[in-house]
Amino acid sequence: MARTTLDKLTVLRGTPSLVAPARATPRESKPLSDIDDQNCTRFYSTSIHLYRGHPSKQRINPAAVVRCALAEVLVHYYPLAGRLREEAGRKLVVDCAGQGVAFVEADANITVDDLGDVRYPPFPRYKEFVYDNHVYMADSPPGLLLHEIIDQPLQFVQVTRLKCGGFIVGTRTCHCLGDAPGVAQYMKAFGEIACGAEAPSVPAVWAREIFNARQPPCPSFPHHEYREPDGDHDRLACTPARDLARVQFSFGPEAIAALRSRMAPGTAASRFDLVTACVWRSRTAALGYAPGDEVRLMIDCNARGRRPRTFGLEIPTGFYGNAYAYAVERCTAKDLCGRDIGYAVGLIREAKERITYEYMQSVADLMVLEGRPVYAWKRTFHVSDLGLAGFDDVEFGWGKAVYGGAADDALQEFPGGANFFQRRKNDRGEDETFVGIYLPEDCTARYQREVEDLTTFTKQYMELAPVTALLARY
């Protein structure tokens, strides 16, 4: 989008209102799980969905369609229309009385094309396209700036009409009610009803009790994710936000093949494993940690779709609560940057395999016993893969979204917040993984060199298969 268009962007919001479920829903109180109500889920996650106009819908107001569908989907997901309260031990409970979701219509003086290439976040000027009335908690844990979520709407929806006939649906949803796959499931149901369905294709399942602490609580793992590493030095943590710069790469087939060429023959490694290893190692080198410094990787590990035999439980289809744990691996900066990339991939695979149902029960136990501690973040690269969550599948009757997903690609509300991996098709229809991170300005050039070096084919591979290596693009 041309800078002049961005500079002249004007969004005029109407009067906000509350949208309640279209029909009577149960009046009850529903406790969240002990995974749901951690300190670091007490905020609102943001998604953006952009659609082009359609010739057959020129006389249809998309905001009216979305508002009507919202009332209907809340019949099926009625806890989202409720309000949170806090009980003893900081336990969160949803009081379900049909209080409603906040909704507002808006108009913007731009077209879809004015936004430019929006395949990847951050979405241009996204704060103009989402509505909230948040205040912030005065007694947040040290280092955190948390949204006030008690007795507040649990979702905020803004529909912004564009002058070309397209529109944007921007949402803020309380993370306590659902993680990325859970909220994406809800949003797809929202869209299905807007498209004429009488009910969601996947029925909503509450079942929060499966992630409650055991009685008596008895953590059975060390949980390094909630224990800070020794030492105070962390270059990123001590850098003011104004001195951080964003650097991004897209990892296409050639970059993935180059990374794989650095692995021992026959070694299993997914695309996620390879990209994560590359970025973690390159970021660590760029930040210049001392050889003996402990550095960490923390992955948001989704429990859905796991084999019950290895995970220990089958997560019910339709479960939309928080169903993830933080998989953590630790090593020295010297080992991470001095050994081949296969070392990092091995650590990543071990960390993911550690997440079982027993591990998640142990996390829940820890939350209850230790007052819901904040996760550790010093010298930690925190990754959340949103590529398979399904936000880009949300439709409201105007066809496939031009953009659907997180508004930004790095969670900056918290120190050590998650860096989001996104997956899209490139101009040739090939899969790409897009990664944007923030670093001190003077570290970005080193980071770029490290990534380029790792995504260039090794000499041995070039001798075996003479091809043209394309670097990860930035």
Image (cartoon, rainbow, N blue to C red):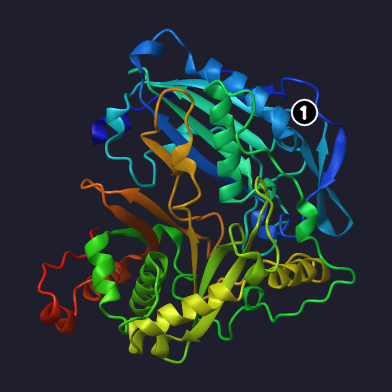
In the current view of this chain or complex, which residue is farthest to the bottom? 292
> Where does the C terminus fall, quadrant-wise?
bottom left
In the current view of this chain or complex, which residue is farthest to the front? 309
| Residue on which disc 1 sits | 99
Asked if residue 276 can be seen in this view, the reply is yes
**Would you say 436 lies left or right of 142 here?**
left
**Would you say 265 lies left or right of 360 here?**
left
Quadrant in which residue 96 is drawn: top right
**Would you say 449 lies left or right of 61 here?**
left
The one of 449 and 268 positioned closer to us in this rendering: 268
Point out residue 318 in the picture as x, y percentages from the top left corner. Answer: 65, 45
At label 1, the amino acid type is Gln
Quadrant in which residue 112 is drawn: top left
Quadrant in which residue 354 is drawn: bottom right
Q: How many marks?
A: 1
Point out residue 72 in the picture as x, y percentages from the top left corner. Answer: 66, 23
> Where does the N terminus fall, quadrant-wise?
top left
The one of 104 and 70 positioned closer to us in this rendering: 70
Asked if residue 446 can be seen in this view, the reply is no
In the rendered view, tell whether residue 427 sits above or below residue 223: above
* Residue at image point 13% right, 75% down: 465
Estimate how packed mark 1 is, as few (under 14), some (14 to 19) or many (20 or more) residues with alpha carbons within 10 Å.
many
